[in-house]
Image (cartoon, coloured by chain):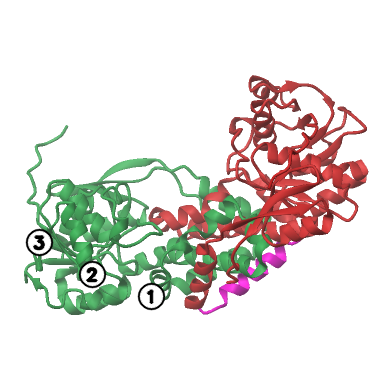
Chain colours: A red, B green
Amino acid sequence: MTFPVPTLPVPPVSVVGLGQLGGSLAAALAAAGRPVTGWDVDPAARDAAAARGVSITTVLTGVVVIAVPLPDLGSALAGLDLDPDATVTDVASIKGPVVAELTGVHGDRFVGGHPMCGTERSGYEATDPALFRGARWAVCLEPGTDLRRWLRVAEVAVAVGAEVVPVTAAEHDEAVAAVSAVPHLLAAALAAAAGQAGPLTLGMGAGSFTDGTRVIASDPAFVTALVTGNPATADALDRVRAQLDRPWAELVAAGHAVRTATRGRRPVRVPLDRAALLALGRAGGAVTRRLAAFVEGWVPDSPVARG
Amino acid sequence: MTFPVPTLPVPPVSVVGLGQLGGSLAAALAAAGRPVTGWDVDPAARDAAAARGVSITTVLTGVVVIAVPLPDLGSALAGLDLDPDATVTDVASIKGPVVAELTGVHGDRFVGGHPMCGTERSGYEATDPALFRGARWAVCLEPGTDLRRWLRVAEVAVAVGAEVVPVTAAEHDEAVAAVSAVPHLLAAALAAAAGQAGPLTLGMGAGSFTDGTRVIASDPAFVTALVTGNPATADALDRVRAQLDRPWAELVAAGHAVRTATRGRRPVRVPLDRAALLALGRAGGAVTRRLAAFVEGWVPDSPVARG
């Protein structure tokens, strides 16, 4: 049984930083017919966004998405005209330190976010309006987060095809250390060791080496910020090192079981409540749609292999 | 200035084991109009190969390619009718132990080989006649290797679009440990650690986690044999662990430099001489064509980044 759903108001979106993530987001919203403005210090990035239908302005209203490199987050809005009612979010790949810093600047108008997508390319030449389709987008629910603002940010993510994972900043960083920071370090170590072994070894590299080193083709400054800025990286790396101490046959079986586990999805409705939303994220689920009094989403329908 | 090149005799090829590698090889040779026969203990694999134009027979002549799983290598030809003049080769992913075992069985008729391709899929359903195109195919040149037989095996590899890397079995195993065995272990450790972290972490896995764990989707028995059977795996893993002890920014820069180094190719001609061929392999080069009195190939034309 379904009920008529009241149409929710759609806030405008202002994207600051029009590189791969910000440029793709602005282009995706423009393509969806949503009111979206953008700004970038680089005129070429502004021109590229304008060509995709994004209005270029320094006036920031609605949901303001800061999409600049990590070191520039704190100063990204300097000199721009920020509506005092705007909700501010970001797309940085670490959340604990960023949420602390930007909550210090913007108070409870800030809600941290992190779309789990992107490629080893970067910059406005790498924008792709389909980038977020099917991706997870973590949106941080801290004890002090304003749930209405959280929903506004979540709605933007859903509007471009992403699925929203409600998490605390600490949970986010622990998960991202394991699935992103550590893979980047392993890729770097694999490539560096092969480089030291010499030309014969590099010449023999095929599928598993190419796949295993792909992410370290990313901009080293970005990777270094991702790895060193995440407070959970060292522990996550230690956990992977500990796995490497297991007997190899046992390790191979455990890794294979996790990698090949098929997980179905069971639809759920979750009330607009911090604890319920965080429980959805902890169960491995995500929000796919916001309705007036609850959100729709899914959780995995089968036990998760535990390596 | 070019000279007329005498046409070289083309030996028939008999492939034993018609799974992903053997089935693809037989299909590729059949597609190229080469005389090729095949055998597999599985009638379904035989039928699939026959449908691709491969003659099914237990009579093995010319270049006999053993393409069965590692544990079955020694017994793969039992009960089959092996021409005493045939040259025998294999496609296994480890070479030191295999060359020792099969030289014990076949004497100097055996030449070890390893095409550096294949996917995480396996079995005859995964055959692909284009599998070898552009791939490196290591062919072992031991002190006792008969160079004429080596050239016959190399010619088969070149015929299906591969580039032949001349190596000793020990050099092969060291290189493959670094570019294949260790990537499989890292992928397993990454997946197993994420599995232990739980559903939220697995739910956040995106590009770098997916890429970094892809190879551990392969058949665990295959991976375990590859990792545990290679005498160089432990040292190669230690070298990657040592890289992980470097300061992260330095490690990221080193890995990035190796992964993104562009290496051009300079064409070379190499005499039919063991030392010259091995030097080509050590320089990171490969053989692309066999002529009567020499081979053609290439070496990298720029220094290799050394991580």
Q: How would you rate the neighbour count of disc 3 (Cα within 10 Å): few for under 14, some for 14-19, many for 20 or more? A: many
User: Looking at the magenta stretch, what is its main secondary structure?
Assistant: helix
Between disc 3 and disc 1, whose residue precedes? Answer: 3
Q: Which mark is residue A278?
A: none
Residue B150 picture quarter: bottom left
Both marks 1 and 2 on one chain: yes
Residue A29 picture quarter: top right
Between disc 1 and disc 2, whose residue precedes? Answer: 2
Between disc 3 and disc 2, whose residue precedes? Answer: 3
Instruction: Write down the residue under mark 2.
Output: B143
> Residue at 80% of width from left, 40% of height from top?
A152
Is residue A24 toward the left or the right of residue B22 in the image?
Answer: right
Whether the residues at callouts 1 and 2 have beta carbons within 8 Å, the answer is: no
Q: Position of residue A32 (x, y in %)?
A: 65, 28
| Residues rendered magenta in the picture | A232-247
Instruction: Write down the residue under mark 1.
Output: B229
Q: Secondary structure at mark 2?
A: loop
Q: Secondary structure at mark 1?
A: helix
Is residue A205 located in the magenta-colored stretch of the structure? no
Residue B138 picture quarter: bottom left
Q: Position of residue B10 (x, y in %)?
A: 9, 52
Instruction: Write down the residue under mark 3.
Output: B62
Q: Chain of mark 2?
A: B
> Residue at 66% of width from left, 43% of height from top?
A162
Q: Nearer the viewer, mark 3 or mark 2?
A: 3
> For this rendering, which residue is in front, A272 or B275?
A272
Q: Position of residue A283 (x, y in %)?
A: 69, 62
Whether the residues at callouts 3 and 1 have beta carbons within 8 Å, the answer is: no
Distance CA(mark 1)–CA(mark 2): 22 Å
Is residue A292 toward the left or the right of residue B87 in the image?
Answer: right
B293 to B264, vertically: above or below: below
